[in-house]
Image: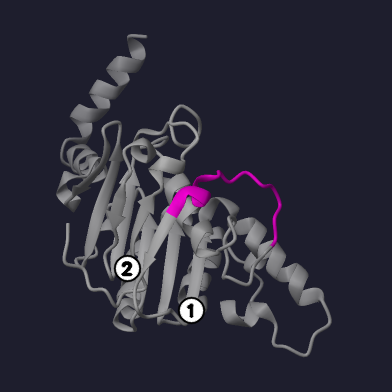
Amino acid sequence: MTGFQSDTYLRCIQLLREKVPSFEQYPFHLHAIRELDTLELHPKVTYIVGDNGMGKSTLIEGLAVAWGFNPEGGSLNFQFSTYASHSELHRYLRLVRGIRKPRDGFFFRAESYYNLASNIEDMDREISSAPKIIEGFGGRSLHEQSHGESFFAAFLNRLRGNGLYMMDEPEAALSPFRQMSLLTQIHKLVQRNSQFIISTHSPILMSYPESVIYQLTSRGIEEVTLEETDHYELTRRFLNNRQRMLQELFREEDGE
């Protein structure tokens, strides 16, 4: 894949392979990381998909930390840490930036979103003349909303445009309807000069037309279409042949 514009915020990432201490240790032993050389990023939306354990979250986490985001999420100003579990991958990534600089940025991480929400409340308890941080998330405590409402409040209120946004499994608490609403919000922000890098399992979220999809497999990283992803194919087969698929699944279980 070539030909992406040079004026995007982040053009590509490169693994500094000559500096990797060992491809036998975590996270470099993961097939997708082991085979990584240069990964070109779409100026609008780049998807990183694959089965559990393939390294999606590890890769997007390394990319986010290399950019300067907190490993647990937030904007560049968030520096809290509840548990330092992130890998050292970011130290071995080179980011090739475009000529433009984003005015906004945010790393959304579903698994540590609770920690982010707690940190916002902690900071807002401090005496300050500045506006409360929660105002940028809709003004209502993120802990006083359902998981899905809280997620969507961040997408709807915090992302302002002209930004670089990275998301790790944003569909985690969203209904299919909300996932489609998130697609609408992504489109609005893309039209406002934003770039997205998204790790996801959701075929709905993968459907944004102006994008590239990278599927992480045991063979490495492959550029695919939506219809070629395992997620789309398995979902399609299940919905089109639900009874047959259930019979096969239950037969395998009963045979154990």
- Looking at the image, tell me whether mark 2 or mark 1 is earlier in sequence order: 1
Under circle 2, the secondary element is: helix
The image quarter in which residue 207 lies: bottom left
Q: Residue at x 73, y 88 (%)?
A: 130
**Camera sees residue 33:** yes
Amino acid type indicated by mark 2? Leu
Amino acid type indicated by mark 1? Asp
- Residue 2 at what x, y percent from top left? 17, 61
Q: Is residue 77 above or below residue 108?
A: below
Instruction: Name the outermost residue toward the bottom.
Output: 129
Q: Residue at x 70, y 61 (%)?
A: 80
C-beta proximity under 8 Å, tags 2 and 1: no
Left or right of residue 195, residue 133 in this image = right
Q: Residue at x 60, y 56 (%)?
A: 72
- Residue 217 at what x, y percent from top left? 29, 36
Q: Is residue 171 above or below residue 242?
A: below
**Main secondary-structure element of the magenta-colored stretch:** loop
Q: Label 1, on which residue?
A: 104
Q: Label 2, on which residue?
A: 183
Q: Which residues are magenta?
A: 80-93
